[in-house]
Image: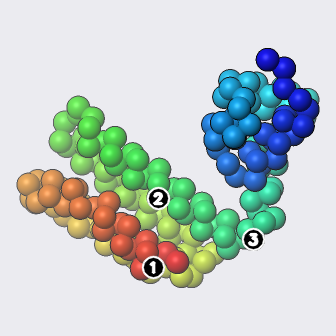
Amino acid sequence: MAHSQDTRNNVRRLYIEGLPLSNVSLTYEVSYETARNWKQLAKDKGDDWDTARAAFSISGAGIDDLNEQLVEYFARQAVTTMRELEDTKISPQQKTELMASLADAYAKFSKSFSRVNPRLGALSVSLDTLKTVAEYLARNDKVALHGFQIHIEDIGAILQERYGK
C-alpha cells in the first residue's frame, strides 16, 4: 500500500522527536518494516534520522539533560546486562568476574560524568561502594553474594533516585 509523503514526513518527525520507530509506525498505521525502509532510504540520500534525532535531543534538552540521559541509558544497559548474567549458564566465578567488571565500568562511567556534573559525584561514590561490597562478597561469601545480587537492582534504583537527580 502506498503512503503519502505527508505520512512519511510525520513518521520522520515523530521519530526525530524521540518516539521509537515501532511506536511511530503504529501511530501512522505503517508497518515497522516500511518505516525502517524509509529511514534507510533517507540515510542513503544523506538524511540520517538518527543524527537528526541526536541533534534534536541536544537542542531541546540542553547539555545537562543530555548528560543525564546518557547516564540513565548506561544505567539501563547495565541493569539489562546484569539480568542477562543472572540467566546465563556460566560458572559462578565467570559470572562474578563479569558482574565485577560491569560494576567497575559503571563506576568509572559515573565518575567521569561527575566531573562534568558534580551532583553525580555522590552517585559515583555510592556505586563504587556497591562494587566494593560485591567484590568482597565474591571473595569471601558466595552465598551472601547471591543474596546481594537479588537486591542490587533495587538498591541501584534507590541510589539513582537519591543522588542522580
Whether 154 is drawn above or below 159: the answer is above
Disc 2 vs disc 1: Cβ atoms closer than 8 Å? no
Residue 25 in the image, given as x and y percentages of width and height: 69, 35
Name the one closer to the observer, 6 or 113. Answer: 6
Indicate which disc residue 163 carries: 1
- As drawn, is 62 to the left or to the right of 87? right
The Cα atoms of the two marked residues, 3 and 2, are separated by 20 Å
Disc 1 vs disc 3: Cβ atoms closer than 8 Å? no
Ranked by sequence position, the earlier of labels 3 and 2 is 3
Q: For the point 51% across and 56% down, which residue is it?
A: 74
Q: Does the rendering let one see residue 139?
A: no
Ranked by sequence position, the earlier of labels 1 and 3 is 3
Mark 2 closeness class: few <14, some 14–19, many ≥20 residues within 10 Å = some
Q: Secondary structure at mark 1?
A: helix
Q: Which residue is mark 2?
A: 75
- As drawn, is 125 to the left or to the right of 85? right
Q: Which residue is mark 3?
A: 62
Q: For the point 60% across and 60% down, which residue is it?
A: 70
Asked which colour scheme the image uses, the reply is rainbow
Q: Amino acid at mark 1?
A: Tyr
Q: Amino acid at mark 3?
A: Gly
